[in-house]
Image (spheres, grey):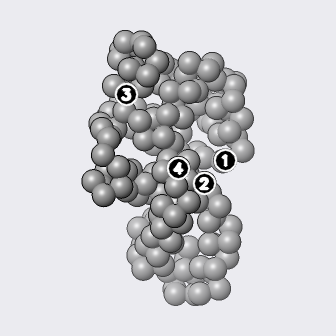
Amino acid sequence: MARVRARDAAAFEALYDAHHRLVYGVAMRMLGDVAGAEDVTQAIFLKIWSSPHLFESGNFAGWLVRITRNRALDVLRSKSYRHEELPEAQPAEEMLEETAFAHIDADRVRAALAQLPPEQRDLIELGFFGGVTHDEMARRAGIPLGTVKTRIRAGLRKLRAALEGTVSV
């Protein structure tokens, strides 16, 4: 990133080559639309090139996933894209999500997700990659809203622990 900040095009190209599949994958998973995922991917890398100072330090891949997710949620929120209820802010879950994404390694995350009980994994995938609200999850699953939130919170705690290497899922 230091070289990108210095406007080194070759460094930016290497950065893109190393991370564009991650960005596209997150966007595609959330939007379910090739063109939309391509647009989000382009917007993310344009943002990195035009404002490289936005990444200060830490886990670059985790930061990249977080800004991609935020951009995809912005797309989902736009009335021209989809007219559905969108995720409401959940401060407690957001803090858990930040911790999980700050320690991201795509293979480790996939492995940790695969080890979660289906009732936790499915809800986490719907919420974080599908952009589905907790209310909608409760309606689809036919379970109380509190149960949805409890399962997501428990699953995120297990993910965080697994990604930090403290315990296995």
The residue nearer to you, when weighing 112 against 84, is 84
- Location of the C terminus by quadrant is top right
Secondary structure at badge 4 equals loop
Q: Cα distance, mark 1 to mark 2?
A: 10 Å
Image mark for residue 25: 2
Residue designated by label 3: 136
The answer to whether residue 157 is visible is no
| Amino acid type for the residue under numbered disc 4 | Gly
Secondary structure at badge 3 equals helix
- Above or below residue 33? Residue 130 is above
Residue designated by label 1: 106
| Amino acid type for the residue under numbered disc 2 | Gly
Instruction: Check if mark 1's residue and mark 3's residue have beta carbons within 8 Å.
Output: no
- Location of the N terminus by quadrant is bottom right
Residue beneath the point at 58% across and 45% down: 103
Residue designated by label 4: 32
The residue nearer to you, when weighing 146 against 96, is 146
| Labels 3 and 4: the sequence-earlier one | 4
Residue beneath the point at 42% across and 13% down: 142
| Labels 1 and 2: the sequence-earlier one | 2
| Amino acid type for the residue under numbered disc 1 | Ala
